Image: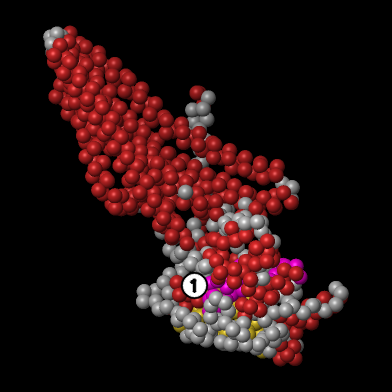
């Protein structure tokens, strides 16, 4: 506890041993890594060093010129000397101002350059993280790490670079003072260590509180981000909890306030103590120096110069001591960024990786699972505890997770329709993640065109595999930019053609701004069916050889689903398809149906074969249609690719490929290992 109760100030403390953030220390090698980021800016650093040295020389020369003004110009009544030296002092003041301006410019270039390098590297590094990283991480905390911490590091680094002149000034001032009077200088030098004590005592606490303050600001930012996006705001309004939300935010803001007060007082405490010391020592020097002047040891001009040099001595010392707080803040900010950069991505591209063959009108490559088993990686391998809300203890974060897929083998042959069905949480969405290599299998291999996905380049894989998820995501941008995200070079005609094929062009053309209409946060200005059709248009623009659809028609009204089915008819023409949907009427004509259960393929065959077998598929089929009959009749026929299997031209604007439909499993795509509840309406936990 650090408290000043007598003065009415109570400094908060967070010394709870269970608080991992407060207890965390800087990792070894942090300073060395910081210096490595300054290396590309060595030219600016050298120029800054030269400018700083020149500025320090001017700072020291001015008191020495003041000595001549007093001893020669004033005491000896030499007006010409007085005039010349005064003009020189004025000129040096102008030059000093220009040098300080140049120092600020170069210091800014270095600090901004380092922050730019850090921010860009961190952003690119986060993009390479696996999907599990984003499912565990609070977005607000991650944004804070990439924004607030980088800005904090930049600020502190700029202050540290600006304090270089203090070091040179300190050395030159001490040398000049010893030249003028060794006795007075010795007194100042003996008391000098007193100035280091406050910084040493407060520095460690500042480091801890700086880290705590950053972490709490990140948590508060995460709360703002979650509550102020469209989905969070709607949830709060629908459940009528604005008061509780305000109270929760107030509690987190209060923690930020308390830590901020403590940090502010501690950082100012050093400056206050050293200012007091400087005032006391200045009084002692004037007393001792005045006695020496009266005794005739040196002249009044020397005392004036010593006083001026003394002010320039303790000024840099005070600045350097206060810079300790900035140095600790910078170290913590850099350390938090380095912590993120040291998190190794699970999915990497091997050296010598090969490209998957481009479609170019050729037959679509087949997809094969060979003895695939998979378990999601433990939290310690994919995320940071400081980026999670209510993170598990370290030992639990390192625990191995249950296996989701067990020795799964199947082939998606070219030109055939394969369907995957099964209860929620049995690994179907996990399989789609392996096809697009969002994860790697823990055993076995996933192959496209005979190539193990771990041996192919990520760029060629992304070009080959296209995905439309159950909840299509759109950026808060124009419809045009959301579409061209798939193919930046697409022309206006290609955009319109893709939108027409996706059954969405009539809607877009009726909007006042057409393709330049802003979709809104996560596409909330559009209906669910419109978002899905835009996602399909985006897929058509990309024209991949393999397409993964994760329940793209779930939770839609009949009209929207019918429109999407018509769009899928275009998308599936001439393609090998794998369809999984909660309405089994759409997969009756599948050449192959795979029934997943508890992470394994329990049944496989055609619709008629599986019905005759009387297993899980037959149970699901009969249960679904019994419920539909009880609800008012059979399921209406849905126009789609299954009902019409005629060969057709290649998908505009690309070539033939696979169409892969997978329905949702459970949270994080994996669901509960070992199965779960059979949901005949296709809705599992979390709307999956």
Indicate the quadrant where residue 246 lies. top right
Q: Position of residue 609 (x, y in %)?
A: 71, 91
Report the magenta residues as a range. 535-558
Residue that badge 1 annotates = 462
Compared with residue 665, is residue 321 higher up or lower down, i.e. above or below?
above
> Does the rendering let one see residue 454?
no
Indicate the quadrant where residue 403 lies. bottom right
Indicate the quadrant where residue 187 lies. top left
User: Residue shown at 72%/68% (left/top)?
Assistant: 560
Secondary element under disc 1, as helix, strand or loop, is helix
* Image side of residue 586 versus residue 383, left or right: right
Question: What's the colour scheme?
Answer: secondary structure
In which quadrant will I find the C terminus? bottom right
Compared with residue 146, is residue 8 higher up or lower down, i.e. above or below?
above
Between 321 and 145, the residue placed more toward the observer is 145
Q: Position of residue 398 (x, y in %)?
A: 50, 63
Indicate yes or no whether the magenta region holds residue 539: yes
């Amino acid at each position: 506890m650090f408290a000043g109760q007598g003065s009415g100030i109570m400094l908060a403390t967070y010394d709870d041993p269970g608080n991992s953030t407060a207890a965390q220390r800087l990792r070894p090698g942090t300073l060395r890594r910081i210096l490595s980021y300054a290396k590309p800016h060595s030219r600016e650093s050298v120029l800054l060093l030269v400018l700083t040295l020149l500025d320090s020389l001017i700072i020291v020369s001015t008191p020495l010129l003041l000595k001549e003004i007093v001893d020669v110009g004033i005491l000896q009544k030499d007006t010409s000397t007085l005039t010349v030296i005064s003009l020189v002092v004025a000129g040096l003041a102008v030059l000093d101002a220009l040098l300080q301006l140049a120092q600020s410019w170069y210091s800014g270039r270095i600090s901004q350059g380092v922050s730019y390098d850090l921010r860009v590297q961190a952003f690119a590094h986060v993009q390479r993280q696996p999907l599990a990283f984003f499912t565990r991480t609070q977005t607000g905390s991650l944004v804070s790490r990439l924004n607030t911490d980088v800005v904090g590091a930049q600020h502190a680094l700029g202050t540290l670079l600006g304090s270089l002149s203090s070091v040179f000034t300190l050395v030159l001032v001490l040398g000049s003072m010893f030249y003028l009077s060794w006795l007075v200088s010795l007194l100042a030098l003996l008391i000098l260590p007193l100035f280091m004590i406050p910084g040493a005592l407060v520095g460690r606490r500042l480091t801890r509180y700086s880290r705590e303050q950053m972490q709490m600001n990140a948590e508060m930012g995460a709360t703002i981000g979650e509550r102020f996006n469209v989905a969070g705001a709607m949830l709060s309004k629908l459940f009528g909890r604005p008061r509780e939300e305000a109270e929760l935010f107030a509690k987190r803001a209060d923690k930020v306030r308390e830590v901020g007060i403590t940090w502010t007082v501690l950082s100012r405490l050093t400056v206050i103590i050293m200012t007091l010391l400087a005032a006391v020592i200045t009084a002692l020097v004037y007393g001792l120096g005045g006695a020496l002047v009266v005794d005739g040891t040196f002249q009044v001009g020397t005392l004036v110069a010593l006083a001026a040099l003394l002010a320039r001595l303790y000024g840099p010392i005070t600045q350097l001591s206060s810079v300790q707080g900035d140095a600790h803040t910078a170290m913590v900010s850099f350390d938090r960024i380095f912590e993120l950069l040291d998190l190794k991505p699970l999915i990497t591209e091997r050296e010598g990786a090969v490209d998957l063959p481009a479609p170019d009108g050729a037959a679509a490559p087949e997809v094969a699972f060979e003895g695939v088993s998979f378990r999601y990686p433990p939290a310690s391998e994919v995320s940071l505890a400081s980026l999670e809300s209510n993170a598990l203890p370290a030992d639990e974060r390192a625990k191995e997770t249950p296996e989701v897929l067990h020795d799964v083998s199947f082939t998606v042959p070219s030109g055939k329709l394969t369907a995957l069905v099964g209860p929620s949480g049995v690994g179907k969405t996990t399989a789609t993640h392996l096809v697009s290599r969002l994860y790697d299998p823990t055993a076995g291999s996933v192959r496209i065109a005979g190539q193990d996905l771990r041996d192919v380049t990520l760029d060629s894989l992304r070009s080959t595999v296209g995905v439309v998820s159950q909840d299509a995501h759109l950026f808060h941008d124009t419809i045009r930019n959301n579409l061209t995200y798939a193919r930046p070079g697409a022309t206006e005609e290609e955009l319109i053609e893709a939108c027409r094929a996706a059954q969405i062009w009539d809607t877009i053309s009726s909007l006042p701004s057409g393709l330049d209409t802003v979709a809104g946060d996560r596409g909330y200005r559009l209906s669910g069916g419109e978002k899905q059709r835009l996602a399909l248009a985006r897929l058509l623009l990309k024209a991949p050889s393999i397409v993964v659809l994760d329940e793209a028609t779930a939770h839609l009204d009949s009209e929207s689903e019918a429109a999407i089915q018509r769009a899928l008819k275009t998308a599936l023409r001439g393609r090998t398809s794998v369809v999984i949907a909660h309405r089994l009427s759409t997969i009756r004509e599948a050449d192959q149906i795979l029934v997943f259960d508890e992470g394994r393929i329990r049944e496989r065959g055609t619709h008629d074969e599986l019905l005759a077998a009387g297993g899980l598929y037959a149970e699901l089929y009969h249960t679904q249609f019994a419920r539909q009959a009880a609800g008012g009749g059979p399921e209406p026929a849905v126009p789609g690719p299954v009902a019409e299997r005629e060969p057709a031209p290649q998908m505009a604007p690309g070539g033939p490929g696979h169409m892969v439909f997978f329905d949702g499993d459970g949270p994080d795509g994996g669901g509960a290992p070992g199965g779960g509840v059979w949901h005949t309406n296709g809705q599992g936990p979390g709307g999956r």
